Image: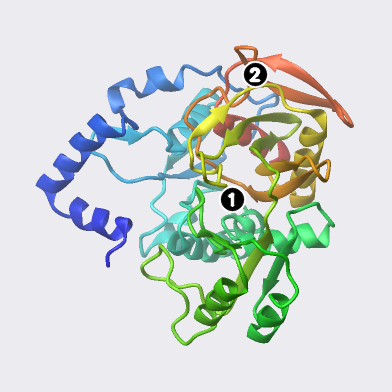
Amino acid sequence: MLSRTQIKDIVFSIPFLKKYYIKRRIKTTNDLIPLDRLDEELNKAEVVLLDNSIDKNIKVGLVKDGDDYEGYVKERSYYPKYERFLKNNNIQYEYYDIYKSDWQEQAKNYDVVIWHTSSDVSTQDIATNKIYVLEKLLGIKCLPNFHEIWTYEDKINAHYLYQRYDLPEIPTFVTHSKEDALAYIEHCKFPLISKLATGSSSYGVDKINNKEEAEKVIKQSFSHKGRKTYFAYQNQKDYVLFQGFIDDATFDLRIMVVGDKLLGYYRYPNKGDFKASGAGNVEKKAIPAEALELAYKVKELYDATFLATDLLYSEKDKQYYIIESSVFIGVDTPEQLVIDGVAGYYKRVAENSYEFHEGKFWVQELTLKEFFDRSQ
């Protein structure tokens, strides 16, 4: 069976089908912006300027993210927000096609490469390898850098970091040993959650109710072919990632941290489900300092330019648990934090102390400001 991505690739290769797809997407999904309205959309946010000037000779290679929609740009595309920041700060840039065979030769034209990578397995493999070459071998500064891309959409690598720094993640078991996995399910508490190493919007997340279901996941994952996933070209192979099921969590809380600024919102699952990510049920309101401080601590230990951490709260345990963290997220609006109808951000002024500042900002622009500030 073909995946949605494969079907879309076929559709986009046939001009009249591509045209029909775009027209239908505009009507049904409404997530494409005409290029002649792009500035109007971007200008809903305040301009973000650098505090200090940078070398005028710096040149940026900007990688476009998202498909070519012929006269339209996807609402969640990062590159238009990056481009707005570069223009407003008079930073030289040009589009950089990092997928072509001459990508290394072209990279020599740039001092900085900015690339919002897609969250699929294939793109992550490409990005991890190429960013390593750009940063470690060619000496080019990258956003994300190699350390950041190593963690992006890889829940196993993120788990290693949480473990190393003794952060309060949901109790997690990761192994690449079949025997170890089978021994674990002899004594673990059910239900538990099985996750793919790579997956967003709750794809690849399954609730495992008993030992028999867990044993099936393990045997498939450690079989010759591995366990089928929603990626048609890659199976879950030679690992399992199990997390405890926090049965009294009623929401999750996404908190974004860039520098000393924090934004975020609450997400709720659909009735009868346990997964809030991807459900589309969002509430924007004040966030407790305890949650803000935990998200800030995670970002600092990650040493990330920007980091979004998803938390849930257990009333029974009286604490927040980390679900996962990501250097990229879906962003639909410059209002990522709203309190009593007013958009803005929290500024960290001291440990466990936060002030609310009003304003609408694209987090992509705040990220570039932080990136260039950190680079000087």
Near mark 1 (Cα within 10 A), the count class, few <14, some 14-19 or many ≥20, is many
Q: Residue furthest right?
A: 351
Residue under the point 74% across and 17% down: 356
Three-letter amino acid code at the position of disc 2 = Gly
Q: Position of residue 12 (x, y in %)?
A: 21, 51
Colouring of the image? rainbow
Q: Which mark is residue 303?
A: none
Q: Earlier in the sequence, mark 1 or mark 2?
A: 1
Q: Position of residue 340 (x, y in %)?
A: 65, 12
Q: Toward the viewer: 134 or 354?
A: 354
Q: Which residue is mark 2?
A: 344
Quick one: SS at disc 2? strand
Residue 233 in view of the camera: yes
Left or right, 17 with respect to 359, comes to: left
Q: Toward the viewer: 67 or 371?
A: 67
The quarter holding residue 137 reads bottom right
Q: Position of residue 206 (x, y in %)?
A: 53, 60
Q: Which residue is mark 1?
A: 142
Residue under the point 61% across and 47% down: 327
Q: CA distance from mark 1 to mark 2?
A: 28 Å
The quarter holding residue 175 reads bottom right
Near mark 2 (Cα within 10 A), the count class, few <14, some 14-19 or many ≥20, is many
Q: Residue furthest left?
A: 16
Residue under the point 74% across and 44% down: 299
Q: Position of residue 234 (x, y in %)?
A: 43, 71
Q: Is residue 344 above or below residue 126?
A: above
Quadrant in which the N terminus is drawn: bottom left
Three-letter amino acid code at the position of disc 1 = Cys
